[in-house]
Image (cartoon, grey):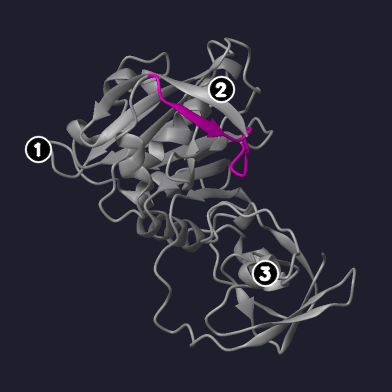
Amino acid sequence: MIPVIVRNMVTEARGIVRLVLGSVDGSALPAFEAGAHIDIKLPSGLTRQYSLCRLQEDAQYYEIAVLKDPQSRGGSAEVHNLSIGDSISISEPKNHFPLVETKRHSVLVAGGIGVTPMLPMAQHLQKMGLPFEFHYCARSPETAAFSSALEASSFADKMHFHYSQVAGSSRMDVVNVLSCHSNDSELYICGPADFINGVLQQAKMLGWPEDRLHREFFAAPALDENVSENTAFKVKIHSTGEVFDVEADQSIFEVLDTNGVFLAVSCESGVCGTCQTGVIDGTPDHRDVFLTDKEHAKGKLVMPCCSRSKTPVLELDL
């Protein structure tokens, strides 16, 4: 982990604060690409993930923006209670939501605080002279972080604001937006789980190829009511042959951790991809939102923090 200091805190919209995190001694922080996030270890011991919301203009600073979510598990409230001068620890940037190397048109779609990874994406695409459009969906300008900055940005002509509670504006016409580019574009979407799922479902109905649909969830959606009750199973470690029981009320990660098998885990809800593990044998019962539909169908990868097994034994490539 890297020690940093909260150098500034700015209210960007109702309930949203932007933090400027600086290195302790003014040295450069690790470089990152658009779409990256960092883990933040908060004073209470909680670890949370937040997207870096602006490309680095000065190598000693990172910026994040955090919505104080009443439904959160406490992390966002703790971030809002930080003060300028506080010391915290962060991870090096990780990127599970990168821009694809292509000259194809990009469609950026942000729902609410999902704007955070999209802003550096737009900055990069503009800098590279690549074609894109940016759709920002929110209730109103007062709840939309960076709305004023985006209206005055170098790519303002590519911005489309969709405010559901503002006269003269309206919700995004998903069909109209997506049907214009289903054959020649990459789609990037971030925001609330239901918002993402709705747009992705429409994209698939319009014929968008799976490999051109890129998304990042901030939180896992509620499990489908049809998901069966958890049952016990066994997990096998391929390298050692060890077999451990996973009870109905345990996760694979918890069992591995208890038995001294190290596995990097961050979100513990199948969102971030940190714990992605190969499957040697058995059929995973996927509960994550990180892997694609194709990856779920192949069954060669699993997220041990949340997913389970449909077979009596799940052998992991560990």
Q: Which residues are magenta?
A: 85-98
Q: Nearer the viewer, residue 235 or 310?
A: 235
| Residue ID at (68%, 53%) | 264
Quick check: is 229 in the magenta stretch? no
Quick one: label 1 or label 2, which is nearer the N terminus? Answer: 2
Kind of residue sitting beneath label 2 = His
Kind of residue sitting beneath label 1 = Ala
Label 2, on which residue? 124
Magenta segment, prevailing SS (helix, strand or loop) = loop
Q: Which mark is residue 167?
A: 1
Is disc 1 in contact with disc 3, using a CB cutoff of under 8 Å?
no
The quadrant in which the C terminus is found is bottom right
Disc 3/disc 2 C-alpha distance (Å)? 43 Å
| Residue ID at (35%, 43%) | 76
| Residue ID at (18%, 31%) | 142
Q: Mark 3 or 2, which is nearer the eye?
A: 3
Crowding near pointer 2: few (<14 within 10 Å), some, many (20+)?
Answer: some
Quick check: is 96 in the magenta stretch? yes
Disc 1/disc 3 C-alpha distance (Å)? 56 Å
Indicate the secondary structure of the residue bearing disc 1.
loop
Crowding near pointer 1: few (<14 within 10 Å), some, many (20+)?
Answer: few
Indicate the secondary structure of the residue bearing disc 2.
helix
Indicate the secondary structure of the residue bearing disc 3.
helix
Is disc 1 in contact with disc 2, using a CB cutoff of under 8 Å?
no
Residue 243 in the image, given as x and y percentages of width and height: 79, 81
Q: Mark 1 or 2, which is nearer the eye?
A: 2
| Residue ID at (59%, 72%) | 307
Displayed quadrant of residue 27: top right
Label 3, on which residue? 258
Residue 237 in the image, given as x and y percentages of width and height: 82, 72
